[in-house]
Every structure is written in C-alpha cells, then in structure tokens.
Image (cartoon, rainbow, N blue to C red):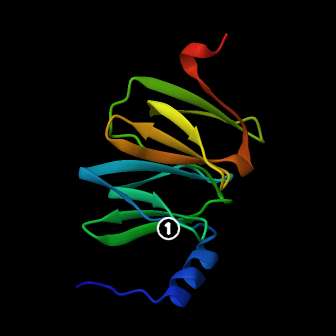
Amino acid sequence: MKTTWKLGSLISLLCLSGALLAPAVAQDTPSTFEVKVQQNTPFRVTADRIAHNQMGLIVLESDGEVVAVVQQHQIVYVVNISETASRRFEIQTYDNSTYQIPGETLVPEQNGMIRVDGPNGTMGYISNSQLRYVVAVEARQ
C-alpha cells in the first residue's frame, strides 16, 4: 500500500517528531543511514536515497517513498554507514560529544549544511548548527 503525503501533514508530522529529513540522491542498493538528532541517541534508517531540499529538510527515500525526514537545524549528522569510504571524519558537537563517520570529502554548502561525499556521490549531511568542528581523522594531530 503506497501512502501519499500532503505537504501540510508531512510538516506537521515532522514538527511533532522534532526531526525532519530531506530529498534523495540515487544509490543502487538500500543502505543503512545513521541519524543523530541533537541530544538523542543515534538511530538507523534503511534507505536508498538521500537529499537536501530547499525547505531545509534532509529526506531519505526507499523504493521511491519517503521513509524519513529530518529538519536540518535539528540534526548533527545523517550519513550512509553502509558505503565504504577511504576516510573517516570526526565530528564534535556543542556539548563536546564526538562521533566518527565515513566519507571521501566534505563540501560546505551555502545553506549551512556540510555535504559528505563518497565514492558513489552524496553519502550524507552534517549540520553546522550543532557543530564545534569536523576534521579528517588522519589530519588531526
């Protein structure tokens, strides 16, 4: 059964949950994305696409359906942990928590997000609103 979401009901649902997600970038197979939202424990979502849309949402899709939406100012990061990448990045948040995520390159965007690219395209996003720093592990001294 396919569910059709109206924009108003989707935004209401996201506001009630305290988190929102965005559109997607195509990937060949379903992957596991780790989602860290503010002080909450990270959770995982199976999806095959991730994207950032103009409304400030990070959207995860599976088989063409939206399976998660996260508001960019609530997230610390959303990243594909299934895809192998040549590097790891350390993230420290405003509360001194640290996390490590895979990736190839970091691309700061004008919308305040940091895109994490991998060998097959966009792997995820990091929000600068919860961030103290993000650094390539091998570059840290």
Depth order, front residue of 92/107: 107
Please state, as top left, top right, bottom left or bottom right, where the N terminus lies in the image.
Answer: bottom left
- Which amino acid, mark 1? Val
Query: Looking at the image, which residue is at 55% across and 14% down?
Result: 138
Query: Looking at the image, which residue is at 42% across and 86% down?
Result: 5
Quickly name the residue at label 1.
69
Establish if 40 lies above or below 11: above
Establish if 73 lies above or below 3: above
Tell me, yes or no, if residue 79 can be seen here: no
Please state, as top left, top right, bottom left or bottom right, where the C terminus lies in the image.
Answer: top right
The spot of residue 81 in percent (x, y) is 39, 40
Relative to 46, 113 lies left or right: right
Tell me, yes or no, if residue 108 can be seen here: yes
How many numbered marks, from 0 up? 1
Residue found farthest to the top: 141
The spot of residue 119 in percent (x, y) is 33, 34
Relative to 30, 32 lies left or right: right
The spot of residue 121 in percent (x, y) is 37, 43
Establish if 37 lies above or below 55: above
The spot of residue 103 in percent (x, y) is 45, 33
Residue found farthest to the front: 110
Relative to 130, 100 lies left or right: left
Establish if 26 lies above or below 138: below
Question: Alpha-carbon neighbours of circle 1 within 10 Å: few (<14), some, or many (≥20)?
Answer: many
- Tag 1 secondary structure: strand
